[in-house]
Amino acid sequence: MTPIEMITNSQQLQQAAELFNKQKVLAWDLEADSMHHYREQVCLLQASTETQNFIIDPLACPDFSPLVPHFADPAIVKVFHGADYDVRMLHRGFGIEIVNLFDTMIACQFLGEPGVGLAAVLKKRFGVDLDKRYQQADWSRRPLPPEMIDYAAKDTSLLLDLYGELTTELAEKGRLSWVLEECELLSRVRTTERSEDPLSARFKGASRMRPSAIAVLEGVLRFRDEEAEKKDLPPFKILGNEALREIAERNPSSIADLNGIGGLSPKLLDRYGKQILQAVRDGRKLPSEALPVFAQKKRPERSRLQDERLKALKEWRTQKAARLGIDAGVLVNNTLLEGLAESAPTEIAAIVGLKNWQAAVFGEELLAIIHGVTA
């Protein structure tokens, strides 16, 4: 593997940024600590040129302003694999916006690769076994052992070679513009900051609970969140969601009522039992305005004609995806097809959610299908 240069101070970062700005293509990745702390943060930023690997330590040099111009430069391609999380974290943590992003995972999807995870792709194309033992490690620990540094560098060391192969294959298939548009859309994703809404508003399945159970759920969620922040741990390491769901449904009044709840071990029960019961009592007392209001979204029933259109569109998608050799969901999602079946637009420009590459490749086909179906 090419040499690794550690960046641990502002002077080194400035020098590295000047080098990065001279590159035409650069590979990037990051490591965070979301599995180990209450507030996740970027703990390492890895970069690879054709001749060298860089490991930047944001805990030692938190001012990433020298990198902002690099990421904003449209003349430099920034190669990531599975960039959704990276894009969000770099923007949230450092205000970095990525222009000219290329995601090799998206490229693999549009080439019909059966496995698009980095380990599977590198194994297939380069015969490289990517050791993922540190995937969920605590990257905030310092000093980092040499084996973790080597692991981090390997995630970018072959991305430039991969980028070269994928762009060539995409161009040969006429799909490079498809991927570039998808990557440009991906570069705009942002993290949704925590709101002042009740915690239960974001809890999966809460909308189907009884109001009394939602109140209890809110109480125990608040307890879990406060305890997680106090101990600097992710909330799930205090109590799991399934345990919280069952507590809310049981509405316990005693320690005995907590026995047998999945995920609530005797050790956790001994540690948190009394606090959980107090949280349940606090939840029962919450006024209605402190709880979320879940709007009942009832989807309008489709007509027979609309159902026939949707069936025809899905059959078309299955056949089209098979001919192209890519996953049907990558080709076009259900939301777009359902909207088409219901609205039946008469021109391509009126198709809500249709991307430019989709409009060019099969926009006319979609219109022909929906207007070729009769009741």
Image: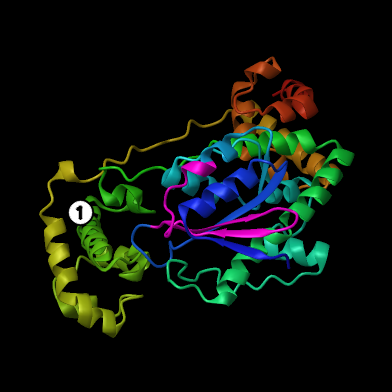
Quadrant for residue 222, please give it.
bottom left
Q: Residue 234 location in percent, x, y?
A: 35, 64
Residue toward you, 78 or 277: 78
Q: Residue 226 location in percent, x, y?
A: 22, 61
Residue toward you, 207 or 22: 22
Q: Quadrant of the C terminus?
A: top right
* Label 1 Cα crowd, 10 Å radius (few <14 / some 14-19 / many 20+): many
For label 1, the residue is: 215
Q: Residue furthest right?
A: 172
Q: Is 44 contained in the magenta span?
A: yes
Residue at x 62%, y 39% (from the top left corner): 334
Residue at x 68%, y 48% (from the top left corner): 26
Q: Residue 296 location in percent, x, y?
A: 36, 38
Residue toward you, 359 or 33: 33
On screen, 273 above or below 98? below
Residue toward you, 12 or 242: 12
Residue at x 25%, y 47% (from the top left corner): 198
